[in-house]
Image (cartoon, helix red, strand yellow):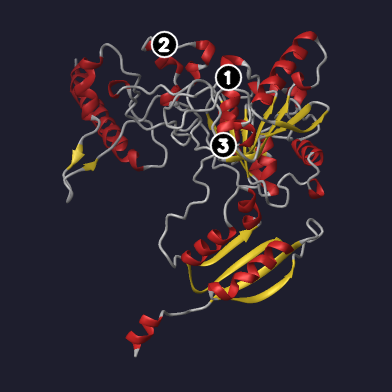
């Protein structure tokens, strides 16, 4: 009996201890989770894409965005964290959204690769988490050749393109040897061969600094653009979020300028004459479709005299289908007034004309037509492509949109020669340069000896003074190149002098 009575007394004590322990654990979890939000990495409530049952969840979701009343009346307390499966979400390029909203898109026109943004009720209002184990990216320039595998845990491309040297998985890193579908021996050698084709000095593709901005269409992991940075060429690499869906992600992780996009139905997000060279190496684009509209879009963004470098079987293969495509493509670019600048092995490089002369000299009814005069070639966002040729503006000899006496120094490298070729007056240009140059400011003119001699005749009339004249240090590139340094004098009108007296 005694043992039973002692056990009965101990039982309530054990129960109380267990209850207290449970309460302490709950308190710890509650306050621990609240404070954990301030840490660098946190795990929050999992949120999915809005659906038909959104209305039943609005109160729950809105409570997550509770605010504190601060001095400005609004201070966010916290945001939820998205589910881990959304760590690579691209809201306006989300295939699931396209399927859920039942968008009717023309797949043959690549509309499913274009931007389709979710309406407000279907947006993810949460923080996108990094993938598990994410590391701070490797710094440039080392990142050009290697990235952390854990940051982009996708090795599909490494296996699929293993014979083309795109990328190689090595332990915790992914290496980029610089290979490509059409440059197995490396992007650097491929780039040098292109420069050699065009007879550029020292086999450097920037042609002495005259080529600076490139567009790489269907860029893969953007090794072409990455290796061009050493030549002081800025390349924008473009590819869709397609079966090689992580190629642009790899490019950006490497630190190479790139973005997700496609030549579909909308204009590229660049004004006309943005690039000096466009590049397509086995980019799998049908350039003949829809009356050549995609090639005409490249023509719009190319500058006068710009190049299109095309490396593809159509440029060299001898089978019947490739020969047919080559004949039709050659005919199309011929009607666009492009000419072959160089052709060797697998690559052809076309050049766009410098003036409108060829366009205006075509036979009436020639296709593709010239764009209407009211068509704005610089309007791009959400604007449909047009299957027409963009002429050069007639307003090529107009003044700058700036105040008089704006700049302390003007640099004119072959500008005077170029503007004379385009039918503009060198005298008008010099007067405009004087207008925007401050008194005591300098002008550096690098041009042919004949042009420099012409400028010297205007110095007295412009109140400019020659400071120095000498041959260009790299005159081996252009034996007739001369540098003239002039300074603008401070001068006053007779009325100003009388006012001073």
- Horizontal side of residue 75 vs 92, given as left or right: left
Element type where label 2 sits in the image: helix
Q: Position of residue 399 (x, y in %)?
A: 47, 55
Provide the residue designation for mark 2: 99
- Marks 1, 2: nearer the viewer: 1
- Quadrant assignment, res 288: top right
Q: Position of residue 446 (x, y in %)?
A: 67, 62
Element type where label 1 sits in the image: loop
**Crowd class of label 1 (few under 14; some 14 to 19; many from 20; radius 10 Å):** few
Between the C-alphas of marks 3 and 2, the distance is 27 Å
- Identify the residue at horizontal 68%, vertical 75% (top origin): 468
181 w.r.t. 194: above or below? above
- Identify the residue at horizontal 77%, vertical 14% (top origin): 323
Nearer-N-terminus badge (1/2): 2
Nearer-N-terminus badge (3/1): 3
310 w.r.t. 8: above or below? below
Decide if residue 407 is in sight here: no
Nearer-N-terminus badge (3/2): 2
Frontmost residue, 452 versus 441: 452
Q: Is disc 1 in contact with disc 2, using a CB cutoff of under 8 Å?
A: no
Provide the residue designation for mark 1: 365
Q: Is disc 3 in contact with disc 2, using a CB cutoff of under 8 Å?
A: no
Q: Position of residue 23 (x, y in %)?
A: 23, 30
- Quadrant assignment, res 239: top right
Provide the residue designation for mark 3: 252
- Identify the residue at horizontal 62%, vertical 47% (top origin): 140
Decide if residue 49 is in sight here: yes
Q: Which residue appears farthest toward the bottom when viewing the image?
A: 501
Q: Position of residue 304 (x, y in %)?
A: 62, 40
112 w.r.t. 178: above or below? above
């Amino acid at each position: 009996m005694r043992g039973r009575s002692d056990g009965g007394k101990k039982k309530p004590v054990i129960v109380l201890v267990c209850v207290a322990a449970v309460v302490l654990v709950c308190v710890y979890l509650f306050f621990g989770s609240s404070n954990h939000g301030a840490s660098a990495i946190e795990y929050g409530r999992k949120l999915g894409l809005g659906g038909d049952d959104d209305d039943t969840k609005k109160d729950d979701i809105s409570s997550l965005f509770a605010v504190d009343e601060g001095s400005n009346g609004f201070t966010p307390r916290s945001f939820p964290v998205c589910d881990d499966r959304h760590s690579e979400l691209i809201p306006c390029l989300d295939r699931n959204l396209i399927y859920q909203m039942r968008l009717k898109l023309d797949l043959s026109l690549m509309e499913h690769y274009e931007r389709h943004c979710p309406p407000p009720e279907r947006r993810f209002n949460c923080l996108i988490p990094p993938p598990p184990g994410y590391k701070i990216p490797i710094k440039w320039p080392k990142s050009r050749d290697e990235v952390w595998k854990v940051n982009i845990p996708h090795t599909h491309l490494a296996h699929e393109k293993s014979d083309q040297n795109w990328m190689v998985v090595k332990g915790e890193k992914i290496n980029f040897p610089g290979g490509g579908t059409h440059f197995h021996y490396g992007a650097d050698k491929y780039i040098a061969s292109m420069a050699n084709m065009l007879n550029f000095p020292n086999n450097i593709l920037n042609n002495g600094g005259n080529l600076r901005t490139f567009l790489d269409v269907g860029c893969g992991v953007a090794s072409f653009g990455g290796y061009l940075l050493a030549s002081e060429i800025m390349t924008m690499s473009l590819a869709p979020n397609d079966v090689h869906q992580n190629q642009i992600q790899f490019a950006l992780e490497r630190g190479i300028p790139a973005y997700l996009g496609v030549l579909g139905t909308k204009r590229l997000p660049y004004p006309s004459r943005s690039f000096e060279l466009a590049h397509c190496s086995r980019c799998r684009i049908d350039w003949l479709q829809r009356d050549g509209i995609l090639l005409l879009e490249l023509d719009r963004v190319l500058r006068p005299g710009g190049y299109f470098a095309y490396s593809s079987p159509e440029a060299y293969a001898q089978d019947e289908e490739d020969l047919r495509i080559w004949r039709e493509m050659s005919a199309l670019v011929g009607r666009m007034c492009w000419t072959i600048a160089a052709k060797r092995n697998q690559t052809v490089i076309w050049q766009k004309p410098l003036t409108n002369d060829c366009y205006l000299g075509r036979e009436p009814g020639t296709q593709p037509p010239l764009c209407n005069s009211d068509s704005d070639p610089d309007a791009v966002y959400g604007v449909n492509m047009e299957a027409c040729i963009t002429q050069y503006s007639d307003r090529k000899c107009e003044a700058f949109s700036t105040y008089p006496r704006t700049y302390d120094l003007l640099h004119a490298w072959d500008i005077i020669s170029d503007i004379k070729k385009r039918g503009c007056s060198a005298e008008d240009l010099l007067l405009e340069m004087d207008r925007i140059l401050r008194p005591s400011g300098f002008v550096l003119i690098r041009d042919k000896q004949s042009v420099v001699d012409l400028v010297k005749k205007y110095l007295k009339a412009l109140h400019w003074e020659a400071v120095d004249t000498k041959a260009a240090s790299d005159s081996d590139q252009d034996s007739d190149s001369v540098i003239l340094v002039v300074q603008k004098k401070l001068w006053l009108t007779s009325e100003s002098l009388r006012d001073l007296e």
